[in-house]
Each structure stands twice: as structure tokens, then as C-alpha cells.
Image (cartoon, rainbow, N blue to C red):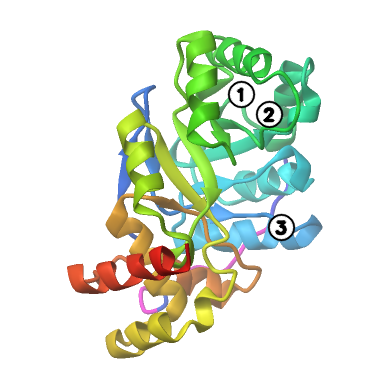
Amino acid sequence: MTGGASFGSMSDATRPDVPTDSVELPSGGSMPLLGFGTWQIEGDKATTAVAAALESGYRHLDTATVYGNEGNVGRALAGSGVDRDDVFVTTKCPPNRAGKELETLERSLELLGTDHVDLWLIHWPGKADLDSIWSAFVAAQQKGLARDIGVSNFDVGQIEQVERATGVRPAVNQIEWSPLLHRADVEQAHRDHGVVLEGYSALRGGTLTHPVIVGIAERLGRTPAQVIVRWHLEHGTVVIPKSENPDRIRSNADVGGFTLSSDDVATLDALGETLT
């Protein structure tokens, strides 16, 4: 794989304080709690954004077959100067590729320019035979093509179903998650099943303008996005903010230098419980 985007060296004054929090997965590998999402970022914009994220200090990239940008993510990674082994790479397989799972993953690896991904997810349940798809995922992991395997947009019953069918529990479940969607029972169910909760679309759905979140941000001298990202980290939840703007990419990662009080966390938690 050749090519890629390059950025000038970042000075210490502009370098974000990127958190190093991570969670251990069944393979023994570590998944950074902070990742960079690439949904709806296409073409050269994806290459540029991922390059900016890597330069800012993100070491976790999230993409998917249906995003159509795996090649761009791969080019940015290759051109970044960051060692592949230092970056946690996730991609996802749509359920309509049932029966062609291995072919789909091999194409993803070709586009990403790597011989394995760190995490491969079933993108959503769909109407396919989940037991069959998950069995193919287990086989891919055994071949070393995916270090860990998981799911996305699954409920607890579906997680239990595929584990019963194969004896292999999904390492991760990626779902839409934010303070406005917080459910203590959902969080606890993932913990009880030993499945890492990963949240997407954390900065959507009115979170950035919610008066409670804005109020906490103003008091702490932080942005609402930073408060939301930090809230995920306080819970040990993976979060994958995305942006095409280099300044926001850096700002969203600049959350290693502060924490939220237990009262602030409880206040943010209650936003979701109130809406349910």
C-alpha cells in the first residue's frame, strides 16, 4: 500500500492531551477507549481526516465495509509514519454478506493494507442467520485475520444467541450511546456478559446543545464534546467521535487532562434515564 496524506509536525503547544485508557479484549490485546470514527467521511476527506487523527494521537480507527472508505483509511495509516502495530483497527461486515464473510474480510484487509484487523464486527443483525455468520467470524479469528470479533447494534438476547451457537462470546457490542441514551440496565447487562460496550454517534442527537451538558462544559472550561467523550471514559466505555475538521479532531481527543466528578457523571447519566 502506498500513498497517504501528510501533515506538518504538531508543536507541543497544539498537541492534545490524549487519554491512554484502554480495555483488555479476550485475545489479550488492548482496545483504546478513545477511537476515531469515519462514518459518512468519504474519499480524500476520509484520508485527510484519518491522517489528522493519527497525527493528533488517536491510535484507534473505526471503519466498515459499507462506509466505502477502507482504502482511504488504509492510505492515511500507511502515510502517517505510525507503526501498524500501534494502531487498533476495526472494520465491520454487513449481514447481507452472509456466506461471503471471509471474502468480505479479505477485501477489507486488502483495502486497509494490513494482514489482520484488531476487531471485526457484524455491523447489524439484519435478517440473516446470525449463528452461521458468527461461525464464519469465529473461523476468521482462528485464521488470525481478526484478533477479536464482535457485533454492532445487537441486543443482549442476540449476543446470548450467537454465544450459545458457537461457545464464543462477542468481545464488543457497538451501539448508539450518549448521555441522552444512557441506560444503567443496558450498561450493566454488557458488564455482566463480559462484553465491552462501545458507543457511536455520541456527538449527535442534540448532545452538543443540551443545556445540562453545555453547563458542565462551561463550568469546567471545556467543550460539550469533550465532556461527552470524557463521560464515556469515566464509564470505561469506548467512544469513537468523528469529524472532518482538524481543529475539532484535536479538540475531541484533548480529554486526558481532566476528569468529571462523580456528581457530574451522575447528572449526565440521569439525562438518559429521564428520557426513557
160 over 188 or under it: above or below:
above
Tell which of 171 and 15 is nearer to you: 171
The residue located at (31%, 33%) in the rendering is 192
Name which of mark 1 and mark 3 comes first in the sequence. Answer: 3
Element class at badge 2: helix
The residue located at (61%, 12%) in the rendering is 135
Image quarter of residue 201: bottom right
* Quadrant that contains the N terminus: top right
Mark 1–mark 2 contact, CB under 8 Å?
A: yes
Mark 2 crowdedness (10 Å alpha carbons): few <14, some 14-19, many ≥20: many
Name which of mark 2 and mark 3 comes first in the sequence. Answer: 3
Q: Is residue 81 visible?
A: no
The magenta-colored residue range is: 5-13
Mark 1 crowdedness (10 Å alpha carbons): few <14, some 14-19, many ≥20: few
Q: Which residue is mark 1?
A: 115
Q: Is residue 96 visible?
A: yes
Q: Which residue is mark 2?
A: 109
The location of residue 216, given as percent across then percent down, is 33, 83
Q: Report if residue 6 lies within the magenta region.
A: yes
Image quarter of residue 269: bottom left
Q: CA distance from mark 1 to mark 3?
A: 21 Å
Prevailing secondary structure of the magenta residues: loop
Mark 3 crowdedness (10 Å alpha carbons): few <14, some 14-19, many ≥20: many
Mark 2–mark 3 contact, CB under 8 Å?
A: no
Element class at badge 3: helix
Name which of mark 1 and mark 2 comes first in the sequence. Answer: 2
Mark 1–mark 3 contact, CB under 8 Å?
A: no
The residue located at (47%, 23%) in the rendering is 160
Which amino acid type is marked by label 1? Answer: Asp
Q: Which residue is mark 3?
A: 46
